Amino acid sequence: MTTKQIPPRAGVPGGATPQAGIATRPVPSAPKMLTLPPALAVHDLAALMGVDSIDVIKQLMRNGLMLTINDAVEHDTAALIARALGFQVKSSPEAARGPGSIVMQHGEEDEDQLESRPPVVTILGHVDHGKTTLLDAIRDSNVTAGEAGGITQHIGAYQVAYEGNRLTFLDTPGHEAFTAMRARGAQITDLAVLVVAADDGLMPQTLEAIAHVKAAGVPLIVAINKVDRPDSDTERVKRQLAEQDLLIEEWGGDVIAVPVSALKGEGISDLLSNILVVAEVGDLKSNPSRKAKGVVVEARTDKSKGPLATVLVQTGTLEVGDQVVAGDFRGRVKAMLNDRGKRIKKAGPSVPVEIMGLSNVPQAGDAFEVVADERSARTAVETREREKHLEQRRTGVTLEEIYSRIESGDVKALNLIVKTDVQGTIEPIRGALEALSTEATRVNIIHVASGSITESDILLAQASKAIIIGFNTGPEPGARSLGNQEMIDIREYRIIYDLIDDVQKALSGLLDPVFRDVVEGYATVRAIFKLGRSRVVAGIYVNEGVMARGAEIRVQRAGRQLFDGPISSLKHFKNDVREINASLEGGLALDGFNDYKEGDILEAHRSEQAS
């Protein structure tokens, strides 16, 4: 007897034939695993899951998001949609590090392939305290007789050899650039050297540099420079450092302080030795066997060579011919030059090189990485553009939401930058704020100083997720514009009890929503007209934005705010107008203020409820 093979029926598990009248159900399969990048377009998410874009858009709408197929969604939102459609989600390494972050994670690497790498050092300090001279002294000490005069290539970073070890130095313009790179996700410095002149002591820029280094969380070595001067006082410098919570080793602390004379080349060997000691404690390692990743140090356009970018390799090895993505641009490495202007074919971890071949000039702090081919490069650029778009939609931390962020674990402490009108109010405010710390919530004062709020403060707040508090002082015009652009929470107070009360309420989750200050325009007073005994009109030129009726006007002089009140009259020539736009002149009068001076800055602003 022969048997006839019956072919499996479609849709029936295992090919079994169902009996008549018995309903069958497909056996549920295990959820598919999906790896999601930090950001991707709606249509890319649909393609990744193999579903129709309409289904993805419906799921987004159910979650309160009205997006089109070309809009970008961040990782958490994409994961939510994927799980709703029956997928298990796995984060890519890039998503785990967060958008723009290029801090190398050893967890991604094969431990057996990790090798020691040179430390990356940044030199910071006050403008006249000898940073450049010290860098030159370190570089010159590494030049052999045959190479004298041969170092002509300036690429923003260079390497020196000392006692058989290599050290990489970043020649950044200052702590603003240092923090601007951090704000872009580039935590590239292993160690900072703070230069303090022995004859001057700690200056305002020195204090700012200390705040920026502390916020970055990197080890610090102090180089006390100009010890050869007859009026040098190293003990005073050590006392001032202790006042900034930087206790040097000989006083029982952990901060290394090295006396040097950059001009005479004295103490350079001692400084380099201490840098190597700190680097050895840090156990700095990376994997030279993988594709290169790193950061752009600086970039420029050369008339004959086109876009040039100085990059610092953080892990892997960069080679001529590699396809690279740097920031929003891509290209193939046509040539590489080291800090001595010599062409090289490959560069390993902690090596700075200048590369040719990018399609355009990236920004300092942009991440760069080697990809497999040109198609991968295009995809990577598109992904980074989406990430940037999402990042621009995010807001900085605000005082209203700090409690919920601490509760959820997103924020470990309330980071504050405090600026006051005079030096005498610093200590009372610092003491009152620090007294608010508890076991559950901590107030972390990153930087405190007297003076107006500057662009440097905005950058520090952006990099450190901090809130800026101004006591009897306000932002400079450029700082206010940058703060609005980066959505930094700037609070201004005139009564110390209001300041302390708001911070305490924020830590307790009791702070009510406040109104956000929106700047609409700036104007400069160019002339003053007296109309009768008690009426004065300011002749103005609108530099930026618009001056409109209904706006409040801040009068600022030499960085100090003199008045804040409504417009009573606004004219263009002899006509009453509702507004005066940028690049036009007009006349303006304020209710309750007549003491104008030429050069005063008028800032038009309004309040809106913070979302």
Image (cartoon, rainbow, N blue to C red):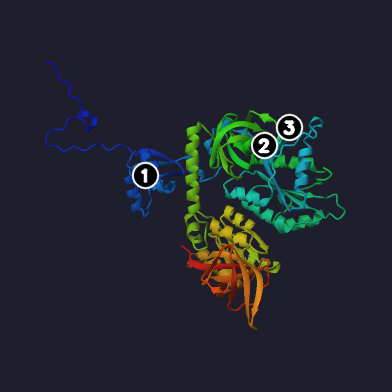
Quick one: label 3 or label 2, which is nearer the N terminus?
Answer: 2
Secondary structure type for disc 2: loop
Mark found first going from the N terminus, 1 or 3? 1
Q: Residue at x 22, y 33 (%)?
A: 11
164 with respect to 353 (left or right)? right
Using residue 433 as the reference point, say whether residue 17 is left or right of it: left
Per the image, the residue denoted by label 2 is 118
Q: Which residue is mark 1?
A: 82
Q: Nearer the viewer, mark 1 or mark 3?
A: 1
Query: What x and y, as percent, mark residue 376?
Result: 48, 34
Q: Is residue 249 left or right of residue 62?
A: right
Image location (x, y in percent) of residue 581: 55, 64
* Residue farthest along the bottom direction in this orientation: 533
Q: CA distance from mark 3 to mark 2?
A: 11 Å
Q: Horizontal and vertical percent for residue 89?
A: 40, 42
Residue corresponding to mark 3: 164
Indicate the secondary structure of the residue bearing disc 1.
helix
